[in-house]
Image: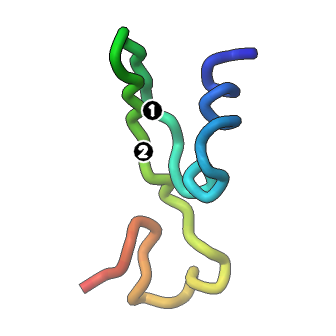
Amino acid sequence: MKPDQLLRAILPEGLIDNFDIARFEKSDSRFDIWLDEKKEQLREDKYNKNIISYGFGD
């Protein structure tokens, strides 16, 4: 199993739906995971000018 597949198996599903795994590092005492928010917009929000792909506008 590839490391990326393993991380997807152990992390909560909702987390993987909204974030991509950017990087991870394992040391003797901890396991660090960096996540990047996916810039995806729901279909129903596409025409709502108050909502943008990475949060809400002003």
For the C terminus, give its image quadrant. bottom left
Say which of 28 and 40 sits in front: 28
Q: Amino acid at mark 2?
A: Asp
Up-down: is 46 above or below 26? below
Residue drawn at the location 56% of the way across and 70% of the way down: 41
> Which residue occupies the extreme left position in the image?
58
Q: Is residue 9 left or right of residue 16?
A: right
Q: Verify CB contact (< 8 Å) between mark 2 and mark 1.
A: yes
Residue 4 rendering spot, x and y as whole percentages: 62, 25
Q: Position of residue 21 (x, y in %)?
A: 51, 36
Residue at 62% of width from left, 18% of height from top?
3
Q: Residue furthest front?
A: 29
Q: Which residue is the site of mark 2?
A: 36
Q: CA distance from mark 2 to mark 1?
A: 6 Å
Q: Nearer the viewer, residue 31 or 53?
A: 31
> x%, y% of residue 26?
41, 15
Q: Which residue: 59% across, 42% down?
A: 11
Left or right? Give the position of 51 relative to 7: left
Number of numbered labels in the structure image: 2
* Circle nearer the N terminus (2, 1): 1
List x then y, in percent, for residue 39.
Answer: 48, 58
Q: How is the image coloured?
A: rainbow
Task: Name the foreground residue: 50 vs 21.
Answer: 21
Task: Quadrant for residue 8, please give it.
Answer: top right
Indicate the amino acid at tag 1. Answer: Ala
Dividing the picture into quadrants, the one containing residue 46 is: bottom right
Q: Which residue is mark 1?
A: 22
Q: SS of the residue at dot 2?
A: strand
